[in-house]
Amino acid sequence: MSSSSNNNSYNSPCAACKFLRRKCLAGCIFAPYFPPEEPQKFVNVHKIFGASNVTKLLNELLPHQREDAVNSLAYEAEARVRDPVYGCVGAISFLQRQVQRLQKELDAANADLIRYACNTGIPSSALQPAETASMQPILPPVNTRRTHPAAAFAAGSIGDDNGGGFFQPPPYSLPWDDNLSGDIDAGGE
């Protein structure tokens, strides 16, 4: 008796055939991708895309591409069930905004790092890890005014609590330009 119950559990229909109330045959196209343990996966895909459309799609794909397609359909269907208006685009937009926010935080941290390097005399090349040196620079200029930061420090406009200047020009060139006057055209003439 236990062998027949094991045989029934082994031959239990896939989630798709169970939901569609049909017999799950040996060559069922849904069986490898919608196991009986994950019924909600097929319910969402069926609700959004329809079983016949998924069948057509899977039949048009090569066997090694089908798992990725089903995972993508399942993700998109779950996102659409959770957010009927935006679906996965809402999640993508959220992640893009998060990347932008984190990029701003990184830029602010790099600006602080530049200020620290200018105050302590650490070469900017020592601030970049060797593996990221070939990537885009992580130390962008942060000054939005036309005055060069080193010139502002040297002039004493940015200083300690007493207002005095504490900047000593570093013995290396700064990561941006060597034009301390702040004139954009002065470097080209």
Image: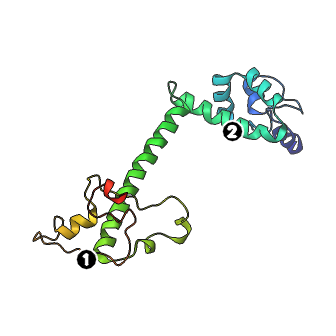
Residue occupying the point 37% across, 68% down: 174
Residue 185 x, y percent position in the rendering: 32, 54
Tell which circle, 2 or 1, labels the residue nearer the N-terminal end: 2
For the C terminus, the quadrant is bottom left
Does dot 1 land on a helix, a strand or a loop?
Answer: loop
- Give the number of callouts: 2
Residue occupying the point 51% across, 58% down: 136
> Eyeballing the image, is 32 above or below 48?
below
Q: Which mark is residue 156?
A: none
Whether label 2 touches label 1, CB < 8 Å: no
Residue 99 x, y percent position in the rendering: 46, 47
How far, Cα to Cα, is label 2 from label 1?
58 Å
Q: Nearer the viewer, residue 93 or 18?
A: 93
Instruction: Between label 2 and label 1, give the one nearer the viewer.
Output: 1
> Eyeballing the image, is 179 above or below 39?
below
Q: Would residue 83 be found to the left or right of residue 142 on screen?
A: right
Residue 108 x, y percent position in the rendering: 34, 57
Q: Which quadrant holds residue 14?
A: top right
The residue identified by callout 1 is 168
Q: Nearer the viewer, residue 69 or 108?
A: 108
Q: Would residue 184 be found to the left or right of residue 127 on screen?
A: left
Does dot 2 land on a helix, a strand or a loop?
Answer: helix
Residue occupying the point 63% across, 29% down: 44
| Amino acid residing under circle 2 | Asn
The residue identified by callout 2 is 71
Crowd class of label 2 (few under 14; some 14 to 19; many from 20; radius 10 Å): some
| Amino acid residing under circle 1 | Gln
Residue 133 x, y percent position in the rendering: 52, 66
Q: Would residue 144 be found to the left or right of residue 110 on screen?
A: left
Q: Nearer the viewer, residue 186 or 12?
A: 186
